[in-house]
Image: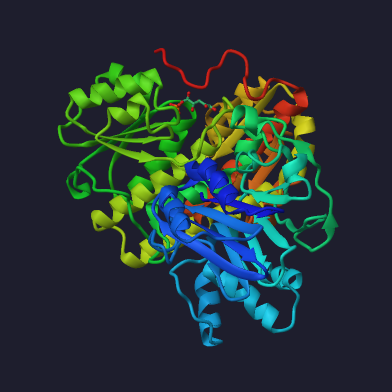
Amino acid sequence: MCGIVGILGNRPVAGALVDALRRLEYRGYDSAGIATLDHGRLDRRRAEGKLVALEKRLDAEPLPGNVGIGHTRWATHGRPTESNAHPHATAKVAVVHNGIIENFRELRESLVAGGARFFSETDTEVVAHLVTREMAHGKSPVDAVAATLKQLRGAFALAFLFAGEDNLMIGARKGSPLAIGYGQGTAGKGEMYFGSDAIALAPFTDTISYLDDGDWAVLTRSSVQIFDEQDRPVERPVVKSSATAHMVDKGNHKHFMAKEIHEQPEVVGHTLAHYIDMIQEKVALPGELPFDWSKIKRLSISACGTAFYAGLVAKYWFERFAKLPVEIDIASEFRYRGAPLEAGDLAIFISQSGETADTLATLRYAREHKQHILSVVNVVTSTIARESDVVMPTLAGPEIGVASTKAFTCQLAVLACLALAAGRARGHLSEEDEQKLVHALIEVPRLMAQALTLEPEIEQLALDLAKVGDVLYLGRGTSYPLALEGALKLKEISYIHAEGYAAGELKHGPIALIDETMPVIVIAPYDRVFEKTVSNMQEVAARGGRIILVTDPKGAAEATIASTVTLTLPDMASTVTPLVYAIPVQLIAYHTAAAIGTDVDQPRNLAKSVTVE
Ligand code: F6R
């Protein structure tokens, strides 16, 4: 996660850009930079390290100009050096970028073959060169950006400046957020802005339009044109942001939960970038581990609620990739069952808040039994983090909605990287296999952005679900924890009774519940257990149950069972399905609750952090 700001101003902008970047430093801070246009000439200043380094550089070499873009970086492709810092530029165009361009290697090769010279290791620089190439073919800046966007794969936000164009700034959003700010007051009148969130724009304006996914926007001082992914002109609402007052706001969403669901392509990308060397396509854990994977005989995982389900998915991964036996427990059960633990083994604790009393108590029990303690937490200043030997942070940002969403998928991202690291260290995963799996992980933010496009369909479906009293969720393999998560999410925010089952268990009891009134949500990507799940679906259909199948194009084609509603996700590697399938599962719960009208962000009887046993 990096921060982006752009100002099309009427006064020198360098100082204002730095001010905005200071508010964005929470999104990344290993380097920063700004570019401005002065009398049509592009120039930039960049510096490695925190923002003060950039400020010092600007003190020594000020940057004039009333138009500019700025960026604080959290390194993904390429080390945190000055030459990798944004903006990236050619003589014609400067660009700042947040997110990942998945196909940058192919693009870079084709640009180099055409004579382009690269000065950084980043994926971003290809964007500057692509726009420049399009302009060299005679296209205007606007057409050149439109043509470039069609060549990019991945999840990203971009902002551009062009040499000789003192009254133009272009921005684009796909998977990573971007907002337009409208200048106000005497100082800001006639100014326009881009920002990666309302917090970036708060010093300038509270009047904002959030771009929808796939949108791109052309700003001049007197006009805003927004286009959708098909380049059709569109309008987006102008809203008042409350970011100045609260520092966290809901953006264009009705609830924090909706905003947090939509943030996932970005925050999961950010989390993955922290654990993956994107250039080599291999896992690169931040820092040394205080244990040797090959000496661990047994791994125990403990957590509560949604975090427990993330652990349950991880059990499949650790056992499969690292051949490491895993015991997983609900934290409140673990220490009371007196599990025998052998000194020197590893215990992993997963917690968004890092304050959950049951998880903390279990951690202390594991410490007493001389386990290595590794925690996966979102709040790095929390008690669980402080009491761990090693902390693997999820970089989900603050999660405000009580029902956990983005923390869950970020936990999965970290746990997947840990399982691959364990697999390599224990000699069960070849370099090639690791690369394949890492490649699949890198695609997750884009796939998540695609999964979010199912939202209108799910909203419609939720109108029916809102009328039922009970729902059953089924899944096999890593889709089984997702079935449990789906049922938990639905019951906690909509108050509809729901149960999650391993699909194979259906015939051992829950099948008795099935009649025409019972919706059964089946999570079944086309993987090696798909056929078996289809048999379970037949059992449901034979008893009049209403099936909602969440699958992919192959699954949709194979499972031709009458009266099934199918939600079709894109094809993907089976390892990453839990991360991407989480999105429809969360959207089903969210829209059902929203249709009923419950207090989605603060459901009754619950608390965000449960600090009692
Ligand atoms: C469900 C949910 C809870 C939490 C659980 C653990 O949506 O949010 O089940 O996952 O209370 O909380 P943390 O992760 O803070 O330990």
Above or below, 301 against 281 in this view is above
Question: Quadrant of residue 197 in the image?
Answer: top right
**Which of 138 and 454 lies nearest the eye of the viewer?**
138
Q: Visible in this render: residue 515?
A: no
* Residue drawn at x 60%, y 37% as measured from the top left: 260
**Which of 319 and 171 lies nearest the eye of the viewer?**
171
**Which of 253 and 4 lies nearest the eye of the viewer?**
4
Q: Visible in this render: residue 231?
A: yes
Question: Quadrant of residue 262 in the image?
Answer: top right
- Percent across and percent down for residue 133 are 64, 80
Above or below, 87 against 71 in this view is below
- Percent across and percent down for residue 387 are 27, 27
**Which of 247 and 523 lies nearest the eye of the viewer?**
247
Outermost residue toward the left in this view: 343
- Percent across and percent down for residue 256 are 64, 31
* Residue drawn at x 77%, y 37% as measured from the top left: 239
> What's the colour scheme?
rainbow
* Residue drawn at x 38%, y 50% as measured from the top left: 417
Total number of numbered discs in the rendering: 0
- Percent across and percent down for residue 351 are 41, 30
Which quadrant of the figure contains the C terminus? top left
* Residue drawn at x 61%, y 39% as measured from the top left: 199
Q: Quick check: 401 left or right of 591?
A: left
Question: Quadrant of residue 81 in the image?
Answer: bottom left
